[in-house]
Image (cartoon, rainbow, N blue to C red):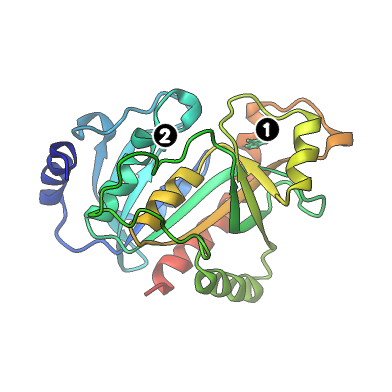
Amino acid sequence: MSNKYNETIAFLKPFLNEQPETGIVLGTGLGGLVKDIQIRHQISYAQIPHFPLSTVESHQGYLIIGTLAGKEVLVMQGRFHYYEGYDMEQITYPIRIMALLGIKKLMISNAAGGLNPDFEIGELMLIHDHINLFPENPLRGHNNPQFGPRFPDMSEPYSFDFIKTAEKFAQTKNMVLQKGVYAGVQGPCLETRAEYKYLRTIGADAVGMSSIPENIVARHMGLTVFAVSVITDKCIPDQLKPLRLEEVLAAAQKAEPNLIQLFHYMVGKLD
Ligand code: HPA
């Protein structure tokens, strides 16, 4: 393993008193889960050796170490996007670090545009599969066998068991929980009507600009992944309206109580 990874691990290890079980990536406008966490350390990305720095104002950049639902968690408050100019290694660096620190499960949230006409703004979609349309794969290049195999299997990118558990929970709470395929694109521009039509045709239910690189490195390192999209806007070609960032953030906020409840439950439940 390169010195870089060793240096980051050496910096972070003293902050851990227990083995973290779960890593969590908090997506756009979904930071409220933090209120449920008993925070022991909240470390600015700027302080952590070799961590990339967050550039988008709506994203804070902190690694949180604490407990949630009685479980030891590592939480990325703020993530890195390809459209910001980072390369794939930088985007996925914190995921690899969390895996090296011993997490076994990764929970991801993101904001996504709804392509499936049955989806409403503010609903949650469990991601059961994805279509990777990023121009690069984070595993391209020399494979480090300490991280994982050259050709990682992707037949279950998002744990079927976790999805079942989440669906059962949602039923007991009368929570609408959609399920679908997430298409990941590089952005930063939103898609054209023709592109939405294309994305729907190839089998996507939602589209966003994150999460897939994180999922790929997590699966490469043997983590089980659970991921949820908040549907922040409708991407139906004939009804398309200009989208404003404030609308995306407002929709994410509207969905936040359900997402928090779901993540809280799932962290406590997963073994
Ligand atoms: N495309 C369209 N709408 C969106 C996206 C996207 O990538 N992310 C959130 N809403």
Viewer-side residue, 215 vs 16? 215
Identified at 41% across, 41% down, the residue is 138
CB atoms at circles 2 and 1 under 8 Å apart?
no
Q: Compare marks 2 and 1 and give the one earlier in the sequence.
A: 2
Identified at 50% across, 70% down, the residue is 162
Three-letter code for the amino acid on which mark 1 is drawn: Glu
Q: Secondary structure at mark 1?
A: helix
Q: Residues within 10 Å of mark 1 (few under 14, many from 20)?
A: few
Which residue in the protein does label 2 denote? 80
> How many marks can you see?
2
Three-letter code for the amino acid on which mark 2 is drawn: Phe
Q: Position of residue 25 (x, y in %)?
A: 42, 48
Q: Position of residue 59 (x, y in %)?
A: 44, 32
Residue lying at the far right in this picture: please name it. Answer: 238
Q: Position of residue 94 (x, y in %)?
A: 31, 43
Left or right: residue 97 compared with residue 30: left
Q: For the residues carrying marks 2 and 1, which lies nearer the camera in this image? A: 2
Q: Quadrant of residue 152?
A: bottom left
Identified at 40% across, 70% down, the residue is 268
Q: Secondary structure at mark 2?
A: loop
Left or right: residue 232 compared with residue 7: right
Which residue in the protein does label 1 denote? 247
Q: Within the displayed image, which quadrant is ligand 1 positioned in?
A: top right
Q: Judge whether 78 appears above or below 75 on screen.
A: above
Spatial CA span between label 2 and label 1: 21 Å
- Tell me if the residue at label 2 has its CB under 8 Å from ligand 1: no
Viewer-side residue, 34 vs 112? 112
Left or right: residue 257 compared with residue 122: left
Left or right: residue 193 compared with residue 96: right
Q: Judge whether 209 appears above or below 125 on screen.
A: above
